Amino acid sequence: MTNAKFNWGLIAPGRIARNFAEALAVIPDAHLYAVASSNLARAQAFAEEFSGEHALDDYQLLVNDPAVDAVYIANPHRFHYDCIKMCLAAGKPVLCEKPLTVNAAQTQELIALAEQNKVFLMEALWSRFQPAWRQVREWLEQQKIGEIKLLSSTFGVNVPRNNDDRLLNPELAGGVLLDMGVYNVSMSQYVMQQRPVKILAEGVVGETGVDERCSVTMSYGEAASQFTCNFMSNTENSFTIYGSKGFIRIPGMFWVASQTCLQLEGQPAEVFESPFRASGFEYQIEEVMQCVRAGKLQSDIISWQESLTTMQIMDEIRSQVGVRYAFLGE
């Protein structure tokens, strides 16, 4: 497969999937082979726009196609579990949008299935693969800012009020934590490389029953990560890592970072910039392709255990805030 085209199947050609398809165009050996949607016309239009070979209105047909090397899943996270399970049962490697599932129990079950069937599975937390965030990791490993003391981040967008929208719909696992806060949680874990010892969370549960604001402190002993995510106001949306010798700041829209800044005490700032080659999805796509070709079942950058820990943390936050999903039997 190394010297051949890597054939991607894409499930759910919506807005996020466009970023994926744009990124494929800058990876020489990546190919959009098939697109599947519940709406055939939508699949056909997407395939035509991004030079996909096949358009289908049946996910199972895509998954069963022996020419598909891996599947990218981009539908609402309420449906991730079923789609991933379908792919793993068919032996198809999976890259699935964040959050991987709706709760930790679902994630645990899928990890067990991936291990049993010896199939690659990865959560599409694209920020971890971006060059700017890889530079952050390098600075941390070099202990440039000394001991980490505090992480501070926000992810807030003033979302137009529409109770029928997916973001506010409890039947679609709506709520700000799973949609936006997953970045605050996952990137805190990426920085700290350990499970928090204590979590304190509070928030606002709106009229539809989902979280519209979550304010959280995750304690890692002497260090802590404090973040707020919300649907109600536009916030700075930066991520700052404070250490004993200085700090690292990833500026606004930290989850889509092409720049980061290292500021040490008494020294001029060091700015790292790396514009994306395409949409920014290209880096995680390349990781999946390398892993699958190497016969790996999981990525070292975002392992199964890391995705599971993120889900366990978010389960605890939702519990403290008071958000429960009836379709899970909660």
Image: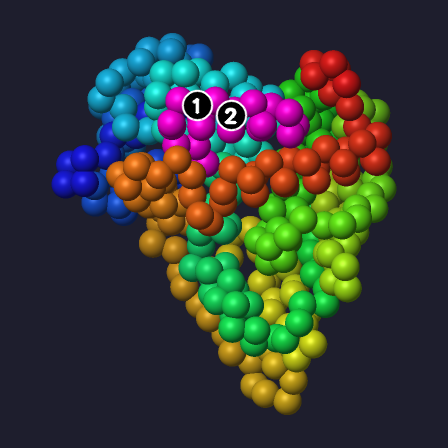
Residue 84 point in image, percent of width and height: 47, 22
Residue carrying label 2: 112
Answer whether labels 2 and 1 touch (C-beta < 8 Å).
yes
Magenta highlight on residue 185: no
Residue at the (77%, 38%) spot, across then down? 317
Q: Can the viewer see residue 129?
A: yes
Q: What residue is shown at x 63% (from left), y 75% (from top)?
A: 146
Seen as rendered, the residue at the extreme bottom is: 266
Where is residue 194 shown, x and y percent of the image? 64, 52
Residue found at x 66% / y 72%: 147
Quarter of the image holding residue 106? Answer: top right
Give the position of the C terminus as an image quadrant: top right
- Assess whether residue 117 is covered by the magenta stretch: yes
Q: Is residue 27 left or right of residue 250?
A: left
- According to the image, label 1 marks what residue? 116
- The answer to whether 326 appears left or right of 293 in the picture is right
Vertical side of 296 occupied by 166: above or below? above
Answer above or below: position of 18 versus 91. below
Give the structural element (helix, strand or loop) at label 2. Answer: helix
Secondary structure of the residue carrying numbered label 1: helix
How far, Cα to Cα, is label 2 from label 1?
A: 6 Å
From the top left corner, tell me how far across and down residue 188 is, in percent.
64, 53
Identify whether 218 is placed above or below 261. Answer: above
Q: Please tell me which residue lies in front, 7 or 164.
A: 7
Q: Callout 2, which amino acid?
A: Ala
Residue 283 in the image: above or below residue 309: below
Q: Amino acid at mark 1?
A: Gln
Q: Residue furthest left?
A: 3
* Magenta region, residue range: 103-122
Q: Is residue 252 visible?
A: no
